[in-house]
Amino acid sequence: MDAAPANRNWGRRGTNYGVIARLKPGVKRSEASTEVAALEQPVLAGEIARFQGMPPRFRMSMRLDSMQKALASRVRASLVPLWAAVGAVLLIGCVNIAGLLLAQAAARRREIATRMALGAARGRIVSQLLAESVLLALGGGAAGLVVARVAIEGLKRLGMEGFDLWRPVQLDARVLLVTLGVTLAASVVFGLAPALETTRLDIRAVLLEGGRGTPGGRQRRLRQVLVGGEIALGMALLATAGLLVRTLEYLQGIDPGFDARHVLTAQLSLEDARYRTSASVDGLIRKSLDRIRALPGVEAAGVGLSLPYQRPLNDGVRISDGPRSGEAPTDMIFVSPGYFEALRMRVMSGRTFAERDSAAAVAVVNDAFARKYLAGENPLGRHLELGKKQAEIVGLVASTPQHSGLFDLGPLAPTPTVYVPFAQAPDAFLPILFTWFSPSWVVRTRDETPGLAGKMQAAIQAVDPSLPFSSFASMEDLRWASVAHQRYLATLFALFAGLALLLAAIGVYALVANSVTQRTRELGIRMALGATVRNAIEAVVRPNLGLAVVGAGVGVVLAWFAARLIQGLVWGVPPHDPRTVLVAAGMMVVLSGLASVLPALRLMHLDPARVLHEE
């Protein structure tokens, strides 16, 4: 079931509950969808909202999806670009092999021409060359499986769990069959063209050349097109990786608004029948914090329904007074006195919560709330409608990055937030609240305190032996986990881009090295007639630099389409950022230039006299 605010400015929809149903035999999905849609009663949302003690500002809807679609919808947005990147790297590798096969075929022109002159059929030679290509591909596929086994373990450690996969990822029979199929298909598709091109030659001309000639212009142009395609694809991957890396930098560079050093957090589930009133929850928090604050080395402690870098409660308030009164969708975090002090959140004006606020209706807002709804005006003294209560704003604090569902601001963003004391939480709302959230105890120490987790566990169990902390984490751990998915994608795309750069450089290097070998006689004669070594190197390198520029230009176009594919994964930087694209294009041209120059430097040792003597 989807729950979404009635006001469209609240942001994106959210799914709170899922129901699994099996259709009766013979019932079509369209018929079942019609029946499910008939169950959508606006009064139902109103009843739930009143049960929670809130105004009925939510709309409920129910949608029928296939189970496969529902399970895969969360990972599809990330896996589709990854599959595209894998396909691009595979294509670059296959194109590279095709170019190398063409270069190898150029060195075997005389052998093939001799066999054809002696009566060998063209089909037999093509079959032999294709068999060689298949054997080469099978060897590469087998080596790839060995690498994949190691790579999968590395991907798991990197953060594969961020995809919420419901089945273990492992090399099974299906993966082996798919790998075999892709390997055979690639070997046939990219091995057949070079084989056909190799047998398309003038037997008489090749035999008269005595092995000193060069392949025809058609074959050279084909290799140049292949290398240009490698450069274009590699440049598009590099630009895509650059966007994801810059997104990761943006998310990691967001001002935290608090001091994360020497802070330990612990989660505790309160989905317990004994904690169904704000008084019982407030009592547990007070007693446990008193014991924790008494521990050696503890400087401050507090409790929050959620923490920075986590998903807060998406709710809303109504601004009661002032020129900008009205509905204000916000994140809402219930906290205890000491929460702000434990995090050392920057207090910009006013004050934070004190013990005396248990009976008073008060609230603290962050500067993102003030900027969005109060145009930056001083919020102190304003009043907010929190359910049936009027709460006075008594403090303004700095915004913290949160994984909010409001406004579609990305994985982390400083969103408008209202902080309310736990003691003011409506009793009727607590059962649902603690179903969705597990409160976190936040403890700040003066320095590193060994054994603090065990002491905190003992403190909470001294208050309630049946309530152990379920997990402990530092704020740095939470920050790291909040961008784990973006780090995973950025790392993978960077690896793919690096591999594409390497393959493209190999392609350019092989093209120039083969050109130098084939043109040794021509260049030796030109040098004997007065050309310098520099002239000879330029004659070999210049066409390939032009090829790199053209390939990078095509890559700019491909990068534009790639950016559209990953635009849902890019935050804090324009999806079609010109600086990223230009840097990627420049890197590709420079690398291609280096790959062109290195084999051309062999001409520095070319002896024109020896070349003429061999003639």
Image: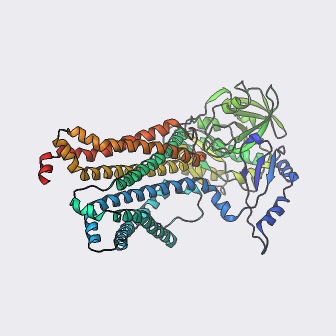
Measured along the vertical axis of the image, is residue 464 above or below residue 423?
below
Picture coordinates of residue 2 (x, y %)? 75, 53
Q: How many marks?
A: 0
Q: Quadrant of residue 584?
A: top left
Q: Nearer the viewer, residue 425 or 597?
A: 597
Q: Residue furthest front?
A: 204
Residue drawn at (75%, 48%), measured in percent from left and top? 280
Relative to the observer, which residue lies in front, 514 or 180? 514
What is the x, y in percent for residue 561?
Answer: 56, 47
On screen, residue 306 versus residue 296, left or right, reads: right
- Which quadrant is the N terminus positioned in? bottom right
**Location of residue 601 in the rendering, given as x and y in whole percent from the top left corner:** 23, 44
Q: Of residues 335 and 604, which is closer to you in this image?
A: 604
> Which picture quadrant has residue 592?
top left
Q: Residue 166, percent across and down?
A: 60, 63
- Image point (78%, 74%), residue name: 26
Please give left or right for residue 381 compared with residue 405 in the image.
right
In the rendered image, the vertical position of residue 6 relative to residue 141, given as above or below? above
